[in-house]
Amino acid sequence: MGRTSVLAWSFLAGILVSSGLLKAASIYTTRLDDPAAVYLTPESFPVRGDGIADDSDAVQQAIDKVGGGGILFVPKGIYRLTKTLYVWPGVRLIGYGDTRPLFTLRENTPGFQEGTGKYLFFFSGGRSRNAGSPPADGNPGTFYSAMSNIDIEIGPRNPAAVGIRFHVAQHCYLSHMDFRLGPARAGIEDIGNEVEDLHFHGGQYGIATKRSAPGWPILVIDCTFEGQSQAAIASDEGGLAIVRPRVTNVPTVVSLAPEKADQLWISDARLENISGPALTIGNENNARTQVNLQNVACKNVPILASFRESGKTVPGTGSAYVVEQFSHGLHLLDLGSTRQIETTLQAHEVTALPSPVASDIPALPDPATWVNVRTLGVTGDGKTDDTTALKKAIAEHRTLYLPMGLYRVSDTVALRPDTVLIGLHPSATVINLPDNTPAFQGEGEPKAVVETPKGSTNTVTGIGVYTNAINPRAVGVKWMAGADSLLNDVRLLGGHGTRIPGQQRGGNLGNRDAWDSQYASLWVTDAGGGTFKDIWTPNPHAKSGMLITDTSTSGRVYAMSLEHHVSNEMILRNASNWRFYAVQFEEEREEGPKALPLEIDRSSHLLFANTFFYRVISCFVPFPHATKVSESRDIRFRNVHCYSNSKVSFDSTVFDATAGREVRDPEFAVLDVTGGSLSARPKSAFTVLAGGAKVEKLADGFLNIAGAAVDAEGMLYFADAREKRVYRWSTQQRKAELVREIEQQPVNLAFDKTGNLLVVAYSGNGTVLAFRPDVKDSETVALASQAVTPRPGTTAFLPVNRWMGDAEFLRDSTTPKPSHYVSPDGTAFIPAGQDFTSGATMWGTKMADVLRAFRLAPAVAGQAFYVSNEHELKTWSFKVGEDGTLSDPKLFANEGGECVATDDQGNVYIAAGQVRVFNPAGKPIDTIEVPQRPTSLVFGGPDHKTLFITARSSLYSVQTRFAGAALTR
């Protein structure tokens, strides 16, 4: 069948192939030669590419042949699909030809009319290990997968169809694609990492997404949306940073999910003909919701934003206007002197919209000008030293293409001012510096593996740089190129996720003796700048992932992942005029317990938008702050998410060393570090403290204390779990006394009525111990799990905090537990779940609620009991049943943290950075400032008017006007 007849048949069949789509600019116009790649050609697979034959099986065969990481090149053609195709981790599909290849779903294709999960392409986390089971979804270890220069079209009467499911992690992307969707559900669903230069036409949504597989922020850059019937984008905790979008003829630009937290950044946008609110915002009274817009041009956008819960709206300022800034969320002024959830808008009317903001991502040179280094004597075989051949190639040619391979070097590869280095897979195209390379040994100045000249316009893309472990002078990339340069899709190899061509996947931790021994993986200096996008730098052998020094040249960093370093992730020193979008920091238990993610020194004019700081679940060593700022000014933070499902999240998010002030709020929409003088913190009336009372440090020198409990006389006991110790505070001796060392790691404590101390311990399966602390060398008894039954007249001890999403929090809080641990005298019991009794772990860490909590508090049947959701920053009230089961949840306050205590007036004290106090109606009435981050709270002392506060390494107390509630001390 001829080309003309194919197009005519496609049109009549309703596939709606448009000339505009077929003529979409192809990025890779010629076939690129790579011996390690797979090519979807009729010579290798039973593929037709004519738009008529079903090519599904042939395309899947080709993807399968790529295997565990590599490239499938797809030539131009029309490939008809009839079922879901699975793309395995690390596989990249790249189209080529003078027009882009098109994957199409014919009108009314069976199986795409209803239901969910109806995808053309499913980016998978791996093949199923069980016959007959579906492939795994993408997960936090799904790296390097991509699709580029390929278009997708969905014909009519496929309303459940979705072009791509893209639930992935670092170094994955979709780029240079058009989606013609008709009435389909969406172009892409549940995305991750970054998408660039995508164009969505029609569909119910262009993008419909939840959070990425690892929970990192997601970059959407240089994309357009037109004609979606519901919204251009629907986000359910997506954490989107949207840069330079153009959206036309839709009811809503971004719809945030009801009652869900989210971080949304939009900048340099152009919105036209938006019939409903441009933004719909949920969870509006909580600090976890953060929305910021900057430089958004609007035409025929009558309502800029609406709020789901309150129904409030923010109208536009005319038929055409420019939003200089719009913000909603927690605003912190003067480094947290005042904190308020608020909505702000600065906009002005215009007679005509300004021109769209140009992209700062330079286009690649015409592929016809690329020179394949394999034709120049460069081998990429991992054995031959390619240094001389690479230097010669750079000297003689501007644009070099590196096919997949391991390019061994022994000296710096210095680029010319206009050199362009192009690879297409940074895990499979690697410039490798072997261990013990002589030129990189000993003490001396840093020496780069790849280096650009000052002020140059270099582009380096799609390449990995590996400095290995034993090269102490090594810098992966030294970048002195100018504002128009580009470093994109580059992996600074080492540590987690490292895969070396021709080798098995490397060990995660590498040579521990060489940790923190090399210079920075990426060093931008000497007036360097430019665009840095989709960079992953997790090498523990380097002192930092990115170091920016001595430059005022404009720099833009997009979708960067900095992880697993020992000392620092990112350092800015004497740097200005940089912007950071969707940057993520992660600290590991082994490599990074003492790592400072972000250090800013003598720098200015910086913007951080949608910045995530995370410590992994298995961390147990506290660390004081996520960001340290010194002698710097005009540092703007927008949408900050600082968190950990461990019990040692960063104690503060930002510490200004010059001002000597820290911000402990883990979530906020706006914080400006101006560098100017700060107002004094407003003085509280201290409605709950005794006259003249001040917070007093009682003892210090601990690792991480919590689990506070008091006996009948009000004597305080607490645990330092990792140190395997239980202490008590002696009021008479004015010191902390060691009560007992417990090998099973004591976590939480409780007392029964006759003075037995119950100890919930970490080690073992369901370990609960009991002993008499007032009797020297009293026997320690292990309590057995008992059947659940109502226990009227006894006291249940329940967790006062959990760390999970709202739906999971309410489900787990109200689910009856299958086991009770009953005290020796039968007056107290601890309900526990199967995860506790079985010793279940998550990522190697026990997360049972009685272990994850910072305290167990006594609960009485029929009375209110308060539980804080540390993750969602909310505190809820429940009723307690006679078997310890909670019911009837009601949101008490949009504040949450590590612990909750109540006094006999019904006031509620929440450990949330400071101790924040609410009256019985849930209104804030007081703040008790503590020198360190509080972890557990309990009322004690002879009159129970002493509020004891455990705070990481120290113990504090303060006298209160009111005693602790009699049955909840």
Image (spheres, rainbow, N blue to C red):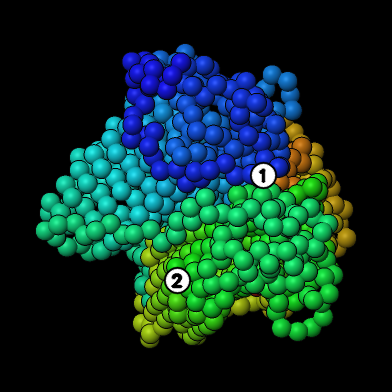
**Mark 1 crowd level (few <14, some 14–19, many ≥20, 10 Å Cα):** some
Residue type of the residue flagged with mark 1: Asp
Q: CA distance from mark 2 to mark 1?
A: 32 Å
Give x and y (percent) for residue 773.
78, 60
- Mark 2 or mark 1, which is nearer to you? 1
Q: Quadrant of the C terminus?
A: bottom right
Kind of residue sitting beneath label 2: Ala
Q: Which residue is pictured at 57% across the width and 41% down the height?
A: 31
Residue 795 shown left or right of residue 924 in the figure: right
**Residue toward you, 355 or 716:** 355
User: Nearest the camera: 614 or 440?
Assistant: 440
Q: Which residue is mark 1?
A: 34
The percent position of residue 261, horizontal first and vertical second, equals 43, 48
Query: In the rendered image, is residue 314 in sight?
Result: no
SS at mark 1? Answer: loop
Residue at image point 77% right, 37% down: 838
- For disc 2, the marked residue is 483
Q: Name the residue rendered at 71%, 42% in the picture.
A: 36
